Amino acid sequence: MYIWEWNTAMFSFFYVGRLTRPGKLCCG
């Protein structure tokens, strides 16, 4: 399903961003 693919992509993006920039994630 498209929604699942989108969620997976966003999760991966935020996860990587969290590893590279801890504390600089959305709304926080």
Image (cartoon, grey):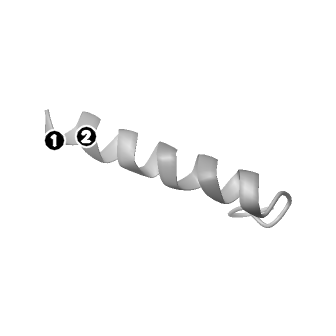
In this rendering, position of residue 7 left or right of residue 27: left
**Amino acid on which the number 1 mark rests in the picture:** Tyr
In this rendering, position of residue 12 left or right of residue 16: left
Image x and y of residue 17, in percent: 65, 59
Quarter location, residue 28? bottom right
Secondary structure found at label 2: helix
Q: Residue at x 15, y 41 (%)?
A: 2
**Amino acid on which the number 2 mark rests in the picture:** Glu
Q: How many marks?
A: 2
Mark 2 is surrounded, within 10 Å at the Cα level, by few (under 14), some (14 to 19) or many (20 or more) other residues, namely: few
Question: Extreme right residue here?
Answer: 23
- Tell me the number on the disc at residue 2: 1
Q: Residue at x 72, y 53 (%)?
A: 18
Q: Gap between marks 2 and 1, in whole Å?
A: 5 Å
Question: Extreme left residue here?
Answer: 1
Mark 1 is surrounded, within 10 Å at the Cα level, by few (under 14), some (14 to 19) or many (20 or more) other residues, namely: few
**Which of the image's four quarters has the N terminus?**
top left
* Residue tagged 2: 5
Check if mark 2's residue and mark 1's residue have beta carbons within 8 Å.
Answer: yes
Above or below residue 5? Residue 13 is below
Secondary structure found at label 1: helix
- Tell me the number on the disc at residue 25: none
Image x and y of residue 12, in percent: 49, 46
Quarter location, residue 24? bottom right
Image x and y of residue 21, in percent: 78, 64
Above or below residue 27? Residue 6 is above
Q: Residue at x 25, y 40 (%)?
A: 5
